[in-house]
Image (cartoon, rainbow, N blue to C red):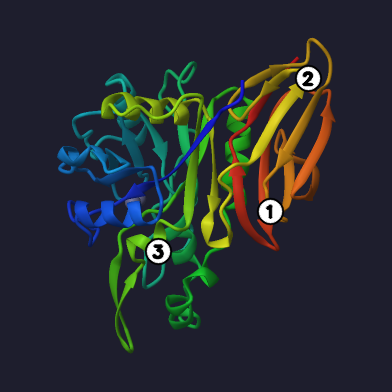
Amino acid sequence: MSSSFAYPGALHIHTTYSDGTGSFPEVIAAARDAGLSWIIVTDHDSLEGAPFAGWHDGLLVIVGHEITPDRNHFLALNVDTVVSNQLPPQDFIDEVYARGGFGVIAHPDERVKNSFKDIYRWDDWVVDGPRQREGSVVGLELWNLMSDWGEHLTGYNKELIFLLPRLGISSPSPATLAWWDRLNIAGRRTFGVGGVDAHAFKQRVPWGEVVVFPYRWLFGTLTNYLLMDVPLSHDAVTATNQVYAALIGGRSYFVNRLDGDAPAIIFAARRGIHRYGIGDTASLSDGPLLIEADVGADAYIRIIANGDVLTSGVRCIRQSITEAGVYRLEGYWGSKSWLFSNPIYVSE
Ligand SMILES: [Zn+2]
Ligand SMILES: [Zn+2]
């Protein structure tokens, strides 16, 4: 299979219905200006924004909610009532799935507390989805822009990285990436996303007040491309289900657009005319497969196989493979992470 359409979007967004400073119309205008096709808004323990769900001049707005106890946050999607944040994490995840929803474990590896933020990590990594994990797919927020930035904030660099925020943005945590690989290797299907965690917080600094960060700026950072064989429907409910299916199917990759866009990457396993894309399962039963990657820019890229670097290159890679496993693509500019694809699954 090959996908013909790639739709850029952002997820993990807060508005004035929780602790964001932007209204829905402001957030929608910023997302359209940033060229996004879809956004998923997840206010804290609130679905008040639900009436805004639907198409807004070429932007599909989806409304979920973030279940937010003191720690252990979870983005609940495709549920139409709020799930209690008083439940233990295992129970609220089960409740989301029992209602026919699914979700994303948010900012799982926070470690730093400072003047800007507390620690909201996912405490128990034994809990990685509903109790009935077989056949269920869970998302993992591999890279949360606000966590990454906030955790790099110190008394010394604070003013500098308020002025030049990209200095405070680096990478997903290695522990998160390793957890993600372990889950998929074990057959516990987990899709990875990049979340902006947009709030546009207003913060006092010595020279006045700054917004950390404006929505328009954030929507030019971590962007998830959803891969589809048919275009998004004009019917909002159908289109929303297409977005959910692409996420659950792991048919996506994300890129930090601050360091360049990547709207049409190639990452596929092929044998002759058969081509398997991101999220697909390819079999080795008819012989070796050729993995092809091309990110369209001279970034350093590498293919990760079962959690280890298989091979690396600049811009393009072609690599024959004979081993079953979980294959995914990463891209870097120097030491800065840039691009992460969901895996291609290769069976015996
Ligand atoms: Zn959170
Ligand atoms: Zn959040």
- Which residue is at the far bottom? 207
| Left or right position of 314 against 215 | right
Residue 189 on image: x %, y %: 54, 26
- Taking 10 as reference, is 326 above or below it? above
Residue 177 found in image quarter = top right
Marks 2 and 1 sit apart, C-alpha to C-alpha, by 25 Å
Q: What amino acid type is highlighted by mark number 2?
A: Arg
Query: Residue tagged by mark 1?
Result: 297
Q: Is residue 125 visible?
A: no
Tag 3's secondary structure?
helix
> Pointer 1: residues within 10 angstroms few (<14), some, or many (20+)?
some
- Taking 301 as reference, is 158 above or below it? below
Marks 3 and 2 sit apart, C-alpha to C-alpha, by 41 Å
Q: What amino acid type is highlighted by mark number 1?
A: Ala
Q: Nearer the viewer, mark 1 or mark 3?
A: 1
Q: Nearer the viewer, residue 308 or 242?
A: 242
Q: Quadrant of the C terminus?
A: top right
Residue ID at (27%, 21%) = 99
Q: Quadrant of the N terminus?
A: top right
Which of marks 1 and 2 precedes in the sequence?
2
Q: Are marks 2 and 1 in contact (CB under 8 Å)?
A: no
| Left or right position of 221 against 300 | left
| Left or right position of 70 against 8 | left
Residue 271 got which mark?
A: 2
Query: Residue tagged by mark 3?
Result: 217
Residue 77 on image: x %, y %: 32, 33
Residue 16 on image: x %, y %: 18, 56
Q: What amino acid type is highlighted by mark number 3?
A: Trp
Tag 2's secondary structure?
strand
